Image: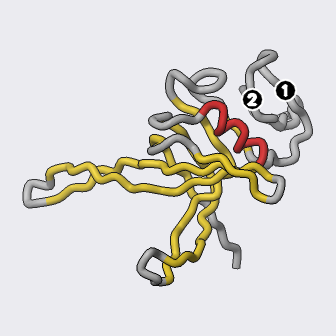
């Protein structure tokens, strides 16, 4: 049976990213606030709830986070959930969920290369790499073969 560990989030960065060097690899971590509307009460009044996530990026994407992501930035993140165990101040063993980011898209006016500019942690293997213009960051795209001998009437 197949399984999948994937999470996609759009939210606002809660604090400036913390950048560290871990065994020669750069790692960037920050908190992400995601707003969610919840209906409550007899009249089902919409109430906004904020969910907080801890997000980490490694390697080249950590460099991008360091340069362009600040407190308040709106970002789209695609990644995996992982767990980590720690001991709190009272000596109790705790487990926390962390998002290990794989793709980062900077949203809003301050985004890199316009409103949508995806940056992948580990790009998939693609056969053809194209960029729209020099200096603009885009991800590689794979072109589908063109079938001119199709039986379609249009």
The image quarter containing residue 65 is top right
Residue 86 shown left or right of residue 138 in the figure: left
Q: Which mark is residue 4?
A: none
Residue 71, how many percent across, how many down? 48, 37
Residue contact between numbered discs 1 and 2, judged by CB atoms under 8 Å: yes
Q: Quadrant of residue 42?
A: bottom left
Decide which of 36, 19 is in the foreground and name it: 19
- Secondary structure, mark 1, is loop
| Nearer-the-camera pick, 119 or 31 | 31
Instruction: Please name the residue shown 70% across and 74% down the image.
Output: 2
In-front residue for pair 145/88: 88
| Residue at x 80% of width, y 45% of height | 123
- Horizontal and vertical percent position of residue 77: 58, 46
**Residue that carries the numbered disc 2 in the rendered image:** 138
Of residue 154 and residue 133, the one placed in the foreground of this image is 133
Q: Residue at x 48, y 56 (%)?
A: 53
Residue 104: give x, y in percent of width and height: 64, 42
Q: Which mark, residue 130?
A: 1
SS type, badge 2: loop
**Number of numbered discs present?**
2
Instruction: Give residue 21's position: percent from left, percent from top.
Output: 74, 52
Q: CA distance from mark 1 to mark 2?
A: 8 Å
């Amino acid at each position: 049976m197949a399984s999948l560990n994937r999470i996609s989030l759009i939210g606002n960065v809660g604090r400036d990213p913390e950048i560290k060097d871990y065994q020669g690899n750069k790692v960037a971590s920050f908190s992400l606030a995601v707003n969610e509307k919840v209906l409550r009460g007899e009249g089902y009044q919409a109430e906004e709830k904020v969910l907080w996530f801890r997000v980490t990026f490694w390697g080249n994407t950590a460099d991008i986070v360091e340069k362009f992501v600040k407190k308040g930035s709106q970002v789209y993140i695609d990644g995996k959930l992982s767990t980590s165990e720690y001991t709190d101040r009272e000596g109790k063993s705790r487990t926390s969920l962390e998002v290990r980011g794989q793709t980062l898209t900077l949203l809003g006016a301050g985004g890199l290369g316009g409103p949508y500019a995806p940056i992948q942690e580990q790009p998939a293997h693609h056969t053809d790499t194209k960029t729209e213009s020099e200096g603009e960051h885009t991800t590689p795209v794979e072109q589908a073969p063109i079938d001119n001998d199709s039986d379609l009437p249009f």
